[in-house]
Image (cartoon, rainbow, N blue to C red):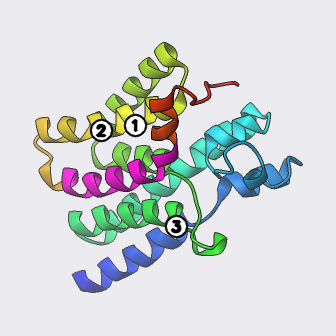
Amino acid sequence: MSEPVIIIMGLAFGYLLGSIPFGLLFTRLGGKGDIRDIGSGNIGATNVLRAGSKILALATLLADAAKGGLAVALIWRLGSDTAAYMAGAAAFIGHLFPVWLDFKGGKGVAVFIGAMLMLSPLTGIAFLIIWLVMAIASRISSLSAITALIASLPILVFLGEADIARFAALMVALSLWAHRDNIVRLRNGTEPKIGS
């Protein structure tokens, strides 16, 4: 297959894969109702945790991360680095704007982690460490995610992975936009802590 065809396939596959709302599916299967009616209304793992199930939250985190990782890995086997980068970004965008949920999805943190672990393992590991340290220190999930997202860009540049950094910058910008309400609450000191 030609590179343009692989890129188009990667974009379509990545977007559709990213659009699968695992948080919504898992909470319904687990008898927790519609996750969009709970807490922040978000379909991500943090809000699934607010539904009262650590197992479902972990399953959501892993499944969402797998969306980013799988999109990159499969398209990488078929095409160039650029095609893989674009597939990962498409999965991320699909998670934020899923066609099945009127384009109202999650914030993309887990999908970003999954994509980074495939594209730049050191950056993905650094992200997880930064998130964990911030979560322990602040007990605020959104602050931990925002800090790790922003930190990932200079880490990529430091590692000499400028091409990946360009695609990561798009994902970081979109995730920060999705976190805009959290950022307002952080500034006002009203953002809920993990477990609250």
- Residue 65 visible at all: yes
Q: Overall secondary structure of the magenta stretch?
A: helix
169 left or right, relative to 47 = left
Q: Earlier in the sequence, mark 2 or mark 3?
A: 3
Task: Please determine whether, in this image, residue 4 is positioned above or below residue 37.
Answer: below
Label 2, label 3: how far apart the Cα atoms are = 21 Å
Mark 2 surroundings: few (<14), some (14-19) or many (≥20) residues within 10 A:
some
Q: Tell me, yes or no, whether the highlighted magenta stretch contains residue 176.
A: yes
Q: Depth check: 101 or 193 in front?
A: 193
Mark 3 surroundings: few (<14), some (14-19) or many (≥20) residues within 10 A:
many
> What stretch of residues is rendered in magenta?
164-181
Residue 127: x percent and y percent?
36, 33
Q: Amino acid at mark 2?
A: Ile
Q: Tell me, yes or no, whether the highlighted magenta stretch contains residue 172.
A: yes
Say which quarter of the image contains residue 19.
Answer: bottom right
Indicate which disc residue 146 carries. Answer: 1
Residue under pointer 3: 97
Q: Amino acid at mark 3?
A: Phe
Q: Depth check: 45 or 141 in front?
A: 141
Residue under pointer 2: 150
**SS state under label 2:** helix
Identity of the residue drawn at 39% across and 75% down: 11
